[in-house]
Image: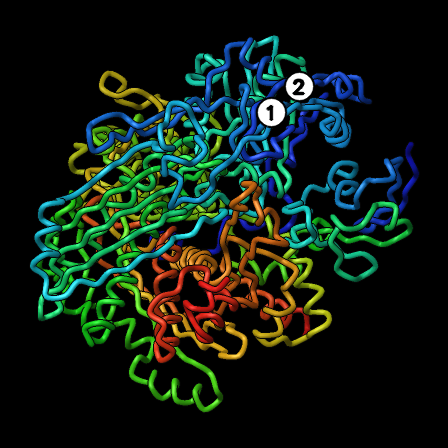
């Protein structure tokens, strides 16, 4: 028996190094004789490059080389690839313009890389970058999502007419139209899901290191998926076999999606390290992160929800314009389509659903997955329109949901839009949350607030999402250009210690602890005997990485299945030594025992026998004790839950304060509740950040990024957010043997509508029915004091 | 042009020739190899670089190495007593007050300073005092608990 198995609140194995300054992030790594790269980036949103004069830069102190687009083109470097093909309504493939690592004749957003300066020190490279003269002719630009596809707008790419990447649809248009036409009431809402900047606190960094003796490159990079970077960079950009490239992702300081993608700087430092014959290091500063990390969300949506006379939903119809930025990022095309529309049924039995998405290019940083990735956008519009429908029909927000929940008895539930949910009691989540939030006491608290001249609002959200990407055959049928299984190797070392090589990557998710707990549970060893190895393509067979809350449902399952194989082999070894049939050996409490006898071997003894096979069934069994599994999940997993937010608003200042926030989540089995709670807290604050504080803004005229630093982009601080009351329900997922569902994104998905529903509820007596995120004090104040009129007069 | 700077870092006397524009954080990371102090922004907001200079918490990205001439500097590497973690480090571990670990050194250094000034801080005090430190992972919930617990363990 072990007390570090599944369900144990063990403290994290990774903490000591992080708490003592012993973490090893990419910028902490210095290679012998390394040089430093600084990028010259476009100051314009849209311009042609007439010429680049790097003479002054090249002769500046310490400068080793300056490379521009002509140099990468001359060496035949390819562009950054997009991993998901989307087809339009008419069957035509999406427009897929080239995404060069350095601009080729044109720049398409502020921050588009134009040249790279390599020097002895970072300071010298930065000084010299100032000396690179780029002759631009500025062109008009477009950044506005809603109007980007208008025919009179400046064009981002010649091959994407009307800035349209695709015009895509999903679901049953005729059914949704009929459902709306026959509805007793139709609720309509126009809303914006604003652009966000992921803002992992560690800026991206990369070091390219070419070894001429081995003719082999090593790339150290801040990525969530080193094997994917190796694959994309080798095959699409540098035209190298994987054997010539090692990608290392050491400690990575948060990702939230932004470190999934293959970025230009990774390929540039790798390529340049051979050009200059020395390692090349690049570290983004925060301004660069704002100008080059893929951003998130950015939808403009019209939604219509039909209801019958009893408040049952009859149809849902959605039209969205999604801003993809200037170029297609690695998964940029898939996020507003297949990671968005298929979850629009939510937790409700709506029979007919249709969604169309116009994906548009604009002169802005590329948009891709950010924590939740498509699902927050779906959840937000659905939970907002459900609340609006409740208001319009006079139903209580909880009651309208009760009338529409998918009952537990209908699980597994086939939605009308492809997905099959894998169990859960959505109404129980809500009822538990209502009780935990003391919904019954709200009116008294509201009266108390009113007595102090404050407005109080109550906001509800019942979310569902899908995690554990992905069944590869399904993903492939929908346009994915990759499989989405996960790999794991369990290596039992001769003395019985255990190494687990996983293709996932931890950058805050606590894999080194959670995965060790899986081993502890199954092999009966303490987590101290287990090392989790991740983030190095030379050490790990393969992997698709960490995103979409997939690491435990998919990567964890691969580990568990490898452990099963280790135990099976151990039984054969033990059976041979104990002179019993392997079928009679049971593995329990860390021992292989002959059933019904006291004959047993400790796990370590069997490991030893596998590596010193003197008394061993060599004719039937290979020596060694190491097993690998590639696990491709049969379905997604579907975490669901209910969030309740209570806000208090100061009428005079428009300041919204979250007074209490209550969460009930069903993540299936919890391996380590401490870690799960931490994931929920973090997700909730990112969701609250979207609802109240954050918003990436570009100047409509110039295309300049206005929110380009922490001075301008409002990151939630400790004093901006509350403590949380969270609890869980447990419905085991049948999709994986662990019964887990994934917990990384729920908070960011469910919090925004809960907060905004609360704000709208607080303002309802002032005639407010809608407010767009972020609900800043100015917006709230204007909504109270004259609402739309005051805004329109601006 | 270079200049000489000398100071005491984590109890050791150190000196180096540096460019005058060298920031204290650069000096710590690049000259002394103390990479526990991190850089997360360029506008002095994130607080990942907080160290103690003569006993007060300072953003090391906002101070020149030359300004620390003669000072006593403590970084995250100097907080533990050998293998024994500082009570604030223990409190962050016990309360799962860190995830990716990148903001953590600055958070812990700020937290020690907060606990010194507010021996038994309320939740509200901790939240307000953490104004200069941004965490994107934890949602602050467990950091606040950790700072309160750490302050108590420090003798508050």
The one nearer the camera, A752 or A144, is A144
Residue A306 in percent (x, y) is at 15, 60
The one nearer the camera, A360 or A417, is A360
Work out how far the residue at label 2 is from the one at label 1, CA to CA, in angstroms: 9 Å
Residue A215 located left or right of residue A442? right
The one nearer the camera, B90 or A756, is A756
Q: Are marks 2 and 1 in contact (CB under 8 Å)?
A: yes
Rendering quarter of residue A583: top left
Image label count: 2
Point 43% across, 59% down: residue: A773
Q: Report the chain holding disc 2.
A: A
Point out the tag, 2 or 1, that comes first from the N-terminus: 2
Both marks 2 and 1 on one chain:
yes
The one nearer the camera, A136 or B30, is A136
Residue A303 in percent (x, y) is at 25, 55
Residue A604 in percent (x, y) is at 38, 37
Q: Is residue A628 above or below residue B74?
A: above
Of badges 2 and 1, nearer the viewer stands: 2
Give the residue at mark 1. Answer: A114
Question: Is residue A496 in view from this perspective?
Answer: no
């Amino acid at each position: 028996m072990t007390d570090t198995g599944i369900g144990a609140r063990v403290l994290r194995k990774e903490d000591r190094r992080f708490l003592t300054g012993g973490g090893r992030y990419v910028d902490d790594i210095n290679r012998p004789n390394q040089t430093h790269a600084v990028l010259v980036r476009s100051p314009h949103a849209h311009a042609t490059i007439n010429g680049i004069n790097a003479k002054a830069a090249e002769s500046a102190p310490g400068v080793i080389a300056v490379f521009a687009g002509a140099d990468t083109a001359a060496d035949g470097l390819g562009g950054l690839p997009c991993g998901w093909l989307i087809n339009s309504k008419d069957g035509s493939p999406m427009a897929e313009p080239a995404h060069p690592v350095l601009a080729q004749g044109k720049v398409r957003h502020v921050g588009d890389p134009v040249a790279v300066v390599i020097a002895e020190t970072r300071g010298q490279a930065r000084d010299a970058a100032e000396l690179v003269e780029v002759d631009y002719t500025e062109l008009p630009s477009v950044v506005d999502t809603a109007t980007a596809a208008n025919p009179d707008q400046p064009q981002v790419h010649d091959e994407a007419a009307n800035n349209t990447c695709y015009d895509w649809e999903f679901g049953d248009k005729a059914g949704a139209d009929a459902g709306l036409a026959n509805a007793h009431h139709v609720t309509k809402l126009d809303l914006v899901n604003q652009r966000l900047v992921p803002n992992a606190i560690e800026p991206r960094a990369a070091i390219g290191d070419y070894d001429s003796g081995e003719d082999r490159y090593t790339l150290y990079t801040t990525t969530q998926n080193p094997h994917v970077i190796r694959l994309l960079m080798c095959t699409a950009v540098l035209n190298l076999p994987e054997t010539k490239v090692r990608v290392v992702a050491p400690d990575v300081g948060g990702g939230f999606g932004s470190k999934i993608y293959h970025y230009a700087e990774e390929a540039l430092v790798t390529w340049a390290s051979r050009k200059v014959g020395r390692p090349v290091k690049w570290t983004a500063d925060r301004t660069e992160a704002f100008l080059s990390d893929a951003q998130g969300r950015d939808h403009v949506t019209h939604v219509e929800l039909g209801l019958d006379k009893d408040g049952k939903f009859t149809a849902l119809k959605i039209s969205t314009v999604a801003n993809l930025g200037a170029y297609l990022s690695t998964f940029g095309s898939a996020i507003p389509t297949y990671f968005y529309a298929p979850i629009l049924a939510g937790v409700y039995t709506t029979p007919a659903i249709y969604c169309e998405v116009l994906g548009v290019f604009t002169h802005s940083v590329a948009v891709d997955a950010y924590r939740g990735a498509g699902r927050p956008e779906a959840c937000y519009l659905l939970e907002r329109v459900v609340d609006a429908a409740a208001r319009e029909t006079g139903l209580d927000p909880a009651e309208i949901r009760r009338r529409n929940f998918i009952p537990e008895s209908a699980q597994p539930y086939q939605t009308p839009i492809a997905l099959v949910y894998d169990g859960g009691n959505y109404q129980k989540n809500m009822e538990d949350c209502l009780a935990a939030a003391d919904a019954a006491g709200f009116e008294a608290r509201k009266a108390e607030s009113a007595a102090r001249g404050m407005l109080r609002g109550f906001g509800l959200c019942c979310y569902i999402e899908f995690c554990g990407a992905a069944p590869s055959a399904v993903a492939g049928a929908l346009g994915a250009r990759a499989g989405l299984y996960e790999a794991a190797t369990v290596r039992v070392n001769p003395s019985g210690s255990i190494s687990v090589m996983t293709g996932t990557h931890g950058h805050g998710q606590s894999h080194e602890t959670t995965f060790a707990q899986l081993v502890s549970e199954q092999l009966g060893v303490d987590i101290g005997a287990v090392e989790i190895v991740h983030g190095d393509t030379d050490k790990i067979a393969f992997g698709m990485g960490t995103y979409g809350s997939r690491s435990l449902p998919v990567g964890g399952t691969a580990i568990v299945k490898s452990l099963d194989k280790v135990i099976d082999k151990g039984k054969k070894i033990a059976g041979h030594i104990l002179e019993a049939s392997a079928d009679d050996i049971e593995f329990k409490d860390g021992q292989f025992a002959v059933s019904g006898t006291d004959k047993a071997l400790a796990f370590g003894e069997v490991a030893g026998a596998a590596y010193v096979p003197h008394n061993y069934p060599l004719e039937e069994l290979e020596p060694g004790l190491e097993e690998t599994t590639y696990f491709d999940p049969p379905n997604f997993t579907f975490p669901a839950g209910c969030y309740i937010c209570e806000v208090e608003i100061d009428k005079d200042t428009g300041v919204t304060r979250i007074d209490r926030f209550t969460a009930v989540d069903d993540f299936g089995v919890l391996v380590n509740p401490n870690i799960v709670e931490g994931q929920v807290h973090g997700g909730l604050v990112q969701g609250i950040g979207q609802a109240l504080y954050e918003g990436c803004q570009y100047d409509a005229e110039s295309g300049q990024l206005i929110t380009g630093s922490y001075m301008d982009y409002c990151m939630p601080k400790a004093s901006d957010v509350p403590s949380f009351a969270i609890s869980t329900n447990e419905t085991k997922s049948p999709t994986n043997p662990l019964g887990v569902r994934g917990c990384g994104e729920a908070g960011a998905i469910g919090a925004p509508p809960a907060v905004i529903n609360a704000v709208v509820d607080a303002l309802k007596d002032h005639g407010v029915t809608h407010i767009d995120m972020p609900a800043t004090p100015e917006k709230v104040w204007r909504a109270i004091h004259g609402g739309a009129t005051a805004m329109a007069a601006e | 042009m270079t200049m000489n700077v000398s100071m005491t870092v984590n109890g050791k006397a150190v000196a180096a020739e540096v460019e005058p524009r060298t920031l204290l954080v650069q000096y710590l990371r690049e000259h002394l190899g103390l990479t526990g102090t991190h850089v997360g922004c360029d506008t002095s907001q994130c607080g990942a670089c907080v160290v103690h200079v003569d006993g007060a918490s300072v953003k090391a990205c906002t101070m020149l190495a030359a300004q620390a001439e003669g000072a006593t500097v403590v970084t995250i590497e100097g907080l533990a007593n050998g293998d024994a973690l500082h009570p604030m480090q223990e409190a962050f571990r016990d309360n799962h007050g860190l995830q990716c670990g990148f903001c953590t050194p600055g958070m812990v250094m700020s937290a020690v300073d907060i606990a010194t000034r507010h021996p038994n801080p309320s939740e509200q005090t901790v939240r307000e005092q953490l104004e200069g430190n941004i965490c994107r992972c934890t949602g602050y919930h467990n950091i606040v608990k950790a700072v309160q617990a750490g302050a108590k363990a420090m003798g508050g």
